[in-house]
Amino acid sequence: MNGPVKDYVCLDLETSGLYPRLDKIIEIGAVKVLGGVAAEHFQTFVNPGRKLSGHA
């Protein structure tokens, strides 16, 4: 590979908490970067299969 990477995908996962064994993914986001510029984006909520608490 020569020079900086200009094409890539950034992923973001939001979870219901900080404990991997107990908490679930609740949102997924992605941005496709081509030539150093954001070209496409994706976002979806995920049903964690349980009720979420009202506090952060």
Image (cartoon, grey):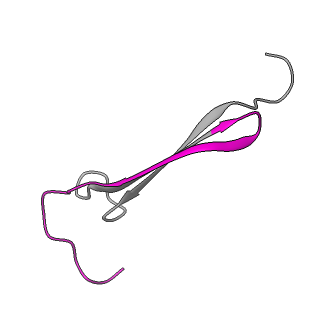
As drawn, the residue found furthest toward the top would be 1
Where 35 falls versus 19 (above or below)? above
Relative image position of residue 52 (x, y in whole percent) = 21, 72
* Numbered range of the magenta stretch: 33-56
The reply, left or right, for residue 42 in relation to residue 1 is left
User: Which quadrant would the C terminus be assigned to in this image?
Assistant: bottom left
The reply, left or right, for residue 1 in relation to residue 41 is right
Residue located 35% across and 53% down the image: 44
Residue 27 within the segment the image draws in magenta: no
As drawn, the residue found furthest toward the right would be 3
| Camera-nearest residue between 17 and 4 | 4
As drawn, the residue found furthest toward the bottom would be 55
Q: How many labels were placed on the picture?
A: 0
Residue located 26% across and 83% down the image: 54
User: Which quadrant would the N terminus be assigned to in this image?
Assistant: top right
The reply, left or right, for residue 55 in relation to residue 12 is left
What is the quadrant of residue 19 in the picture?
Answer: bottom left
Relative image position of residue 27 (x, y in whole percent) = 36, 56
Relative image position of residue 35 (x, y in whole percent) = 76, 33
Where 18 falls versus 43 (above or below)? below
Residue located 22% across and 78% down the image: 53
What is the quadrant of residue 46 in the picture?
Answer: bottom left
| Camera-nearest residue between 3 and 34 | 34
Residue 55 within the segment the image draws in magenta: yes
Residue located 22% across and 57% down the image: 22
As drawn, the residue found furthest toward the front would be 39
Relative image position of residue 47 (x, y in whole percent) = 20, 56
